[in-house]
Every structure is written in structure tokens, then in C-alpha cells.
Image (cartoon, helix red, strand yellow):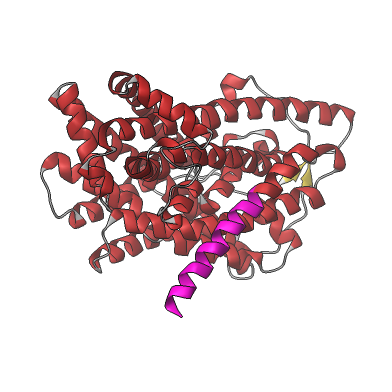
Amino acid sequence: MGIKPLKIDILPNAPSIKKLIGPSFILLGLGLGSGEIILWPYLTSHYGMGIIWGAIIGITFQFFMNMEIERYALINGESVFVGLSRRIRGISFWFLLSSFVPWIWPGIIASSAKIFGAVFGLEDTKLLGIFLLLTIGVLLTLGPILYRTVETFQKILIGIAVPTICVLSVILAKQFHWHALAKGVVGVGESYSFLPEGIVLASFLAAFAYSGAGGNLNLAQSFYIKEKGFGMGKYAGRITSLLTGKKEDVSLTGTTFQVNQQSVKTFNVWWRNINVEHFIVFWLTGSITILLLAILSFATTYGTSAGITQDISFVMYEAKVIGERIFPFAGVFFLLIAGSTLYGTQLTVFDATSRILVENLLLSVPKKLSEKHIPRLYYMVLWIQILAGVGVFLFGFSEPLQLLVLAAVLNAFAMFVHVGLTLFLNLTSLRVELRPNIYRISIMVLAFLVYGGFSIYILVDRLSKFL
């Protein structure tokens, strides 16, 4: 299958902001399950609130990255991967590699299994982790319309998790904890500024990269824009279950619109509305949740023996303190929420990476695969990833924090690459009237330099230890 030229049609009118709510919940859910619940609370339990500025900068970068990804999909009704393949031959092979390798490490579901194991008294959670992976495969396979399954799942989880975290934080955090949070947002910690002495930069980079979705998962936002029917995505089909769904024609290549005064005016309404939706759901809700989870960890574990552990046992200690200070079931409920949120994140990760891998497979071997194969390929790739995760567990790699940090460092490098590529795509393929302004370009360039600088530093540091 060659890449077909973009078709031309009419840009539909934008609905109200309320009707646009949806895709941002998926990216928010991707962030809640790793950076927010595990990595930033882990760092604040060790080093206090002085490092939390990194989370705010990280999620702010991702807001602007996501919006540039959405910009291309809104205008052309196709993913960034297709757009880049139009301009850079063979780029799909990079996306295959950088999407499969970082996410093959099941650190998120290993964390979920560890937390559920603490609730039900299981010490060895390897088999539980495998079971959870298999149930994710079943849920995604049986959902009639894939996008709706993922969106509904995340809305339910976020609707329960965020209010719970708010209540617990307000009850447990004292005035000096909030004061420490306020100082930490501007990089002022206890006896340090911005980064404490002795911090493992790989762990900080991991948390920074996971302040939101992370890795190539941000690029999956262009799929969700299409499947929600936003902008020119109205003319693209959706992936449905092979077993329970009604078949729809799925087009890899998109549809754009003639640029004139009326279409630019209509696009500007779309652009304003989706920026507001993404700011409220992704940036604002995500930032508040990161800060509340961090202060909850700080208020319950900082300065204790749990604050020096090198695993996720601080989460269990956090739950223990919550149970002691409020009532016993409150701690158990916190663990159930944390474990379920991590489970939901892993489900969404598999959905996003499967979409990315399928699309880039089609772009890599166009003569052997076509668009009609998309649903079957999706489920084949999904189960390959699940079985690969099972294999990682069976080979004995089951420590959640190590798996999370490894995956996040790899994903930070992937983000360094795709930030630059997305900006390049929008500046070279879109009409001048639809391109990002200098303010957004500057933030994208800064994100590119930061992710690149961190990644190169970690790579050089690790290589120097082997030489």
C-alpha cells in the first residue's frame, strides 16, 4: 500500500467544548498510572518537595507537544506517522523500534500487581502480574468499539481516583506540607535548589518523561482525534472488535480542506476549543493530581524508613499511614485505587502502542499489507506485546521500579526525537495560516533541547561506567 494523496473535503463546524471532552482523558490516564502514582511520589518520599518543579515543567511541555500532534490530525485527518512518512522515507522503522522496545518492560502492571498483592496478602506477585496482562487482552479484544472501551475505562477510573486523592491530601497534609509544596514548585527544597545532591538522574528523567503520557504514546493522540471524529478525522473510520464489533472502513491516509477565509475561521474555533479542553482535562487536572499525590507521599513517608527504600514499598507504607490516621479501610481503598489506576494505564498503553505499531507496519511494508488488515493486525500486535510482557515476568524481571525507570529513560529519548519531528512536520507540511506561532515553536524547541540533553547525559554516564 503506497501513501495515497490527501483527499479534499469540507472542514465540519466545531462542537462545544463539552462535546469535545474525551481524548484528553486517555492521555491523562496514561500519566496517572506511572509518573503520578509511582515516580514523583517515590522522589518526594526520598528528597522532599523541592524537586516537584520538574513535574510542572514536564506536563507543560507535554501539553504543547500534544497540541501540535492534534493540530496535524485536525487538519489532515491522519496520524503524524503517516504525515512524517510522506516526507521522510523509512521513518516508520524508527517508530516500530522506539515504540516496541521501551514498552516491552511491564513495569506499570508489575506495580499494579505488587499493590494488589499487598491488599490480598500475596508476596510473590509474578503470576498475578501475568493474569492482569491477560485480562487486559480480553477486555480490549471484546470491546465492540475500541476507542470507546478505552475512553470509558479511563473516565471511570479518573472519576474515582482524582476525588479520592484530593480528599486524602486535604485530610493528611498539614500547613508546613503545603508550604513545602509551594516552595517546591519554584525549585526550593530543604537545603537544596532544584536538584538535591545524590539524586539518581535516571530516576528524575524517568519521572520528568512520565509527567503525562511519555514516549511515543503522545503521538497516539492523533489516533484518538481521528476516532473521535474531530476536525477532518470525521472522514476516517474506527477500529472495532473482530468478535463483537460492527466492521468499519479504516483509512490510514487522511482528508484535508481547502484553505480559505471561511475554513481558517472554522479551524480557529476548533483550535481554541480543543486547547481549552486539553488544558482543563490534561494539564490542569494532571498538574493538580501530580501535586496532590506528591504531597500525600511527602506527608506520610518523608523522613521515615519508607523514604529510603529503592522499590515501591513506600506506596504500601503510605497506605498504612493513611489507615492509621483516618480509619483502616481508607488505606486499603487507597491501594485499590492505585492498583486499578495502574491497571488502566497499562490497558491504555497497550491500546496506544498497538495502534502505533500497526500503522507503522503498514507504512514499512506497503506491498504486503493493506488497510483492510488493520483490525486483525491490531489484535495480533496487542497479543504479541502481552505475551512479551508475560515472558519478561517468567524470566524473573519483576521489580516494578527498575522496570519503570528503564522504560522511562528509553521513552525520554523517543520523546526527544518525536518533538523535533512533529515540529518539522507542522512547519513544512501545513499552510502558513495553520502553522504554530513563534511562541509554540519556542516551547517545542526548548522541549527538544531538554529531552535531548537529559537523554544524552544519561547515555554518556551509563556508557562511561561500562568502559
Reply yes or no: does residue 465 show up in magenta. yes
Q: Is residue 173 left or right of 430 when viewed as pictured?
A: left
Quick one: 418 or 231, which is closer to the camera?
Answer: 418
Residue 286 in view, yes or no: no
Outermost residue, right side: 261
Query: Would you say residue 168 is visible in this rendering?
Result: yes
In the image, residue 131 lies at what x, y percent?
A: 23, 52
Q: Examine the rendered structure and indicate whether residue 245 appears above or below residue 406.
A: above
Residue 66 position within the rendered picture, expressed as x and y whole percent measured from the top left: 61, 41
Q: Is residue 199 above or below residue 364?
A: above
| Coordinates of residue 281 in the picture (x, y in percent) | 52, 28
How far across and down, in percent of the image, does residue 8 sit? 80, 42
Q: Residue at x 19, y 21 (%)?
A: 326
* Residue at 53% across, 32% down: 282
Which residue range is magenta in the image?
447-467
Which quarter of the figure has residue 271? top right
Instruction: Please state which of residues 104 and 283 is positioned toward the viewer in this rendering.
Output: 283
Q: Residue furthest bottom?
A: 467
Which residue is at a point 57% across and 64% down the rendered structure image?
456
